[in-house]
Amino acid sequence: MTNAVANSLPLAQFYPQNLMIESVLVEDNEIHIKMHSQTPKCNCPKCMMESSSLHATHHRKVQDLPIYGKRVMLDINLYEFNCVNPKCSITSFTETFENFLNNYSYMTERLVDLMTTLALETSCESCARILKSMNIKTSGDTVIRTLIKRYEKQPEPECGSAIGVDDFAYKKRHTYGTIIVDEETHKTVAILDGRDGVTLKEWLKKNKQVKTVTRDRASAYAKAVEEILPDCMQIADRFHLHQNLMDAVNKILSREIPATTAIVSEDNKGDNHSDRCEDIPCKKNRTHCG
Ligand SMILES: [Zn+2]
């Protein structure tokens, strides 16, 4: 059976049920939607105790995803509740709307989702430029702050007993960091500042389940692991062994082989070798030629 085709799109279905739309004002570039909360009670985010004790009402202007290229601004009237748990560390809290609006946020979660996805696929500055072209008010700095907030909200990733540690450059020859990867899941479990082993030591103190560390052949990581987890097995990984071998081979070849080797033409083939050698720019001692 086919559903009847509606000739209008009810706006309310795109917002949480406990947010009542009061008015909609459509301008050339913007749509202003005024709404108020109808939340009768809310759980304290600290102690999770339910409260219906109203402390205050707040106004917050929140940016949402654009509609047909028009910027959407929500003017929301929301509640602050008292925490009724005397043992709780906070006395009051502002309500949040799950998967729609977080504490103190001036953007809806769906707008934050778009921003973070775009920033991770491009860059913070490119993301800001693309969003501006979609009539979303933002800046590169806002995108960075939003990414950091999202990252801090992520639960601490679980780490197994085998890890890989390596350094990487934020800016080559200036700023470096350390990346730790779980060898079983192949997922990044930590990004640390610096590559001198200091931050790695702090991380290892909190992750004493680690039994195996795969690393490069630099001494900073080796010392850090040895100091914090002396029984841990340290493995020089194949990539760095290959890299070290290739560096050594390159060094020897560039020292032993002339920088330029002349190819003797057919006409000069019969010439005496010692005559030819004078014309060949030879990096090595001439007595080695021939
Ligand atoms: Zn509480």
Image: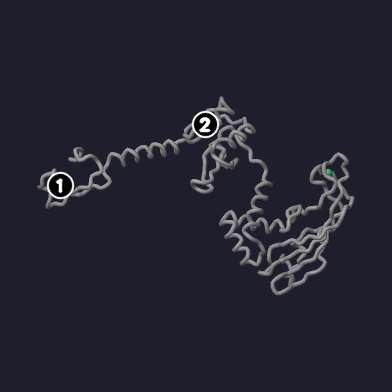
Looking at the rendered structure, the kind of residue marked 2 is Ala
Give the mark toward the camera: 1 or 2.
1
Secondary structure under badge 1? helix
* Residue found at x 50% / y 35%: 215
Q: Is residue 55 left or right of residue 224?
A: right
The quarter of the rendering in which ligand 1 is drawn is top right
Mark 2 Cα shell of 10 Å, populated few (<14), some (14-19), many (≥20): some
Looking at the rendered structure, the kind of residue marked 1 is Arg
Secondary structure under badge 2? helix
Please identify the quadrant where the N terminus is shown.
bottom right
The x and y percentages for residue 93 are: 82, 49
Q: Residue furthest right?
A: 53
Q: Residue furthest bottom?
A: 28
Q: Which residue in the protein does label 1 denote? A: 276
255, 158: nearer the viewer: 255
* Residue found at x 41% / y 37%: 244
* Residue found at x 49% / y 47%: 172
Q: Which residue in the protein does label 2 denote? A: 222
Residue 200 vs 174, above or below: the answer is: above
161, 284: nearer the viewer: 284
Kindly tell me whether mark 2's CB lies below 8 Å from ligand 1.
Answer: no
Mark 1 Cα shell of 10 Å, populated few (<14), some (14-19), many (≥20): few
Residue 270 vs 107, above or below: the answer is: above
Please identify the quadrant where the C terminus is shown.
top left
The x and y percentages for residue 253 are: 31, 40
110, 83: nearer the viewer: 83
Q: Is residue 273 left or right of residue 62?
A: left
The x and y percentages for residue 248 are: 37, 37
- For marks 1 and 2, the one nearer the N-term is 2
* Residue found at x 68% / y 59%: 111
Residue 20 vs 186, above or below: the answer is: below
The part of the image, by quadrant, that contains residue 85 is top right
